[in-house]
Image (cartoon, rainbow, N blue to C red):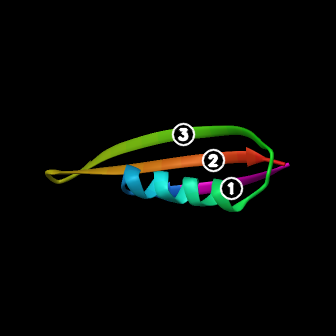
Amino acid sequence: MKVKIFDESHEKDLEENINNFLSETAADIIDIKYQVSITMFGDEQIYCFSAMIIYN
């Protein structure tokens, strides 16, 4: 069993990277965990979109 972790500041970048990984691997996907974090820096909202793919 292995894991692959993705971390992006934009959801479209995360989507593209995950889709690329899935299309380039013949791995047996066990699960995908998704998380969004939001923080404030002054008046700016900072987002972090991450996913962990568990596969064989």
Of mark 3 and mark 2, the one earlier in the sequence is 3
Q: Which residue is mark 3?
A: 34
Locate residue 24: give its quadrant.
bottom right
- What residue does disc 1 label? 4
Q: Residues within 10 Å of mark 2 (few under 14, many from 20)?
A: some
Looking at the image, which residue is at 58% across and 60% down?
Answer: 20
Tell me where the magenta segment starts and ends, as one range: 1-6
Q: Is residue 27 magenta?
A: no
Label 1 sits on a secondary structure element that is: strand
Callout 2 secondary element: strand
In-image side of 9 versus 45 (left or right):
right
Q: Which mark is residue 52?
A: 2
Q: Amino acid at mark 1?
A: Lys
In the image, residue 31 lies at what x, y percent? 70, 37
Q: Position of residue 18 (x, y in %)?
A: 57, 54
What distance separates the C-alpha of mark 2 from that of mark 1? 6 Å
